[in-house]
Image (cartoon, rainbow, N blue to C red):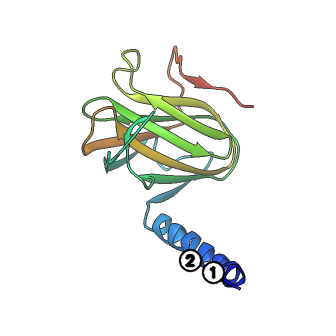
Amino acid sequence: MKMFRLLKVLPVALVMILASTEANFAQVPSIQIRRKLPSDPLVLRGQSEGSVKSNCGHVGTEPNQIIQVTEALPYLRLTVEGPGKPTLFIDGPDGRFCVLADSYSGSKAELSGFWQPGRYLLHIGNLSPGQYNYNLLISQEKLPNSSNIRQSR
C-alpha cells in the first residue's frame, strides 16, 4: 500500500523538480545566436559564482548564460576574459566541454569551431574559488593561428 502511494506521488514530485529547474533557467540570461551577430564581438558581462569545485574550476550550480544557436554555424568563438584563470564549462547538444585559461590564449578561456543548432548552458568559473567579474566575447571572426578548434562530430 505504501509503495502504491509513493508511485502516485513520485511523478508529481518529479514534475515539481523539473518545473523548478526550468523556472531557475528562466532567470538565467539567454541570447539567440544567428549567422549574423548584432555586433562582433558581442560582449556579455557578468560575475562567476564559483561555489562548486569541479574538474572545470569553481563554477556555480546554475549556468551564467544560455545561448540558443538557431542554425548551424561554420565558425563561432567564445572567449572568457577576467581576473585570475577563468574557466568555461559548456553543456550543449553535442556534448560537454571544459575550457581552461592558458598562456597561449593570454590567460583567457577560449573555444572556437563549428557549432550545431541547439541550446548551450554556459557555466563561467575560475580555477580559484570566489566571485570574479568576467566578459564573455562571442565572435564569428576567425583569429589567425587559432589552436583551440572544436571539430564537428
- Disc 1: which residue: 12
Q: Is residue 41 visible?
A: no
Is residue 112 something one can see in this rendering? yes
For mark 2, give the secondary structure: helix
Q: Nearer the viewer, residue 143 or 79?
A: 79
> How far from the left and from the top, in percent, is residue 56?
44, 34
Q: Are marks 1 and 2 in contact (CB under 8 Å)?
A: yes
Amino acid type at circle 1 is Val
Q: Percent from the top left, x then y, of residue 80?
A: 39, 36
Question: Which residue corresponds to the image point at 44% horizontal and 56% vertical from the top-left?
Answer: 62
Q: Nearer the viewer, residue 12 or 83?
A: 12
Q: CA distance from mark 1 to mark 2?
A: 6 Å
**Quadrant showing the N terminus:** bottom right
Q: Is residue 49 above or below residue 105?
A: below
Above or below residue 140? Residue 20 is below
Which secondary structure lies at badge 1?
A: helix
**Residue 74 lies in quadrant:** top right
Rendered position, 118 above or below 144 = below
Quadrant of the rendered structure where residue 124 is?
top left
- State the residue in front, 70 or 5: 5
Foreground: 132 or 106?
132
Q: Could you tell me residue 101's position as x and y percent?
A: 39, 25
Which quarter shows the C terminus?
A: top right
Q: Where, by quadrant of the figure, is residue 55 drawn?
A: top left
Whole-percent x, y for residue 47 in the image: 29, 49
Q: Which mark is on residue 16?
A: 2
Which kind of residue does numbered mark 2 sit on?
Answer: Met
The residue at 50%/72% (across/down) is 20
| In-image side of 94 versus 39 (left or right) | right
> Residue at 24% across / 43% down in the picture?
130
